[in-house]
Image (spheres, helix red, strand yellow):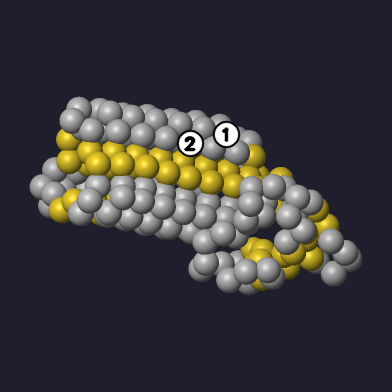
Amino acid sequence: MTCADCFVHESSYVEDGSTIGAGTHIWHFSHVMADASIGRDCTIGQNVFIGAGVVIGDHVKIQNNVSVYTGVVLEDEVFCGPSVVFTNVLNPRSEIARRDEYRSTRVRRGATIGANATIVCGADIGRYAFIGAGAVVRGRVPDYALMLGVPASPAGWMGRHGHKLVPADGSGRWSCPVTGWRYEQGPSGLRCLNQDEERPL
């Protein structure tokens, strides 16, 4: 394990070959497998499993009882609520080994996944998307989309600050009712007009 100025609770197990960034905290009863990479200033809650080869960016928060399986990439600033479920095989059977059929899943920068949501392998969740608690997601989710239900379907747009957006005018623009920040339609969903999306708030 390579761990530069990070904290790992004594009840957790981090395998050799994994990399943990500075300022990251790994709390009780968690397991990080070899070849996993966790970025800087992350919070890994209790009873979290991070599989081999998983890539987690900087400033990611993973709440309790989440398993992040091989094939999943969480970009910077992602939030995973308690008991979020990721999968990596589409049609599992105990009798049949399907390790060569793992499908990759990407959760892009700033996205939020609510408690008990299920992310079916192969999903691509857009920047700053917001997945409601208990939703089941598969496929592509646009940037800033609010997704609710089983199966998840679009229910509006969410801004950078986590507030539901309202129409700003008749030209396809949206605004945050709390901050006043404005958004417009882009090639992969909405895009923010007030700040470079690579910059933290």
Q: Nearer the viewer, mark 2 or mark 1?
A: 2
The disc, 2 or 1, on the residue closer to the chain's N-terminal end is: 2
Question: Identity of the amino acid at label 2?
Answer: Gly
155 relative to 53 in the view: left or right:
right
Label 2 environment density (alpha carbons within 10 Å; few <14, some 14–19, many ≥20): many
Image label count: 2
Q: Quadrant of the C terminus?
A: bottom right
SS at badge 1: loop
Residue at left 27%, top 54%?
21
Residue 163 point in image, percent of width and height: 69, 47
Residue 115 shows up from this direction: yes
Residue at image position (79%, 51%) is 177
Task: Name the residue tied to disc 2.
Answer: 81
Residue 188, picture quadrant? bottom right
Residue at position x 62%, y 69% in the image: 195
Which residue in the rendered view is the most extreme toward the left?
16
Q: Secondary structure at mark 2?
A: loop
Residue 113 image point, x, y percent:
52, 42
Closer-to-camera residue (33/44): 44
Which residue has dot 1 on it? 133
* Amino acid on which the number 1 mark rests in the picture: Ala
Q: Residue 29 at x, y = what percent?
A: 25, 28
Work out whether 168 lies above or below 29: below
Please say whether residue 156 is visible from this viewpoint: no
Question: Are circles 2 and 1 on residues that touch, CB within 8 Å?
Answer: yes
| 3D distance between C-alphas at marks 2 and 1 | 8 Å
User: Is residue 195 found left or right of 96 in the rendered image?
Assistant: right
- How crowded is the residue under tag 1: few (<14 C-alpha within 10 Å), some, or many (20+)? many
Q: Residue at x 77, y 58 (%)?
A: 180
| Left or right side of 139 for 86 | left
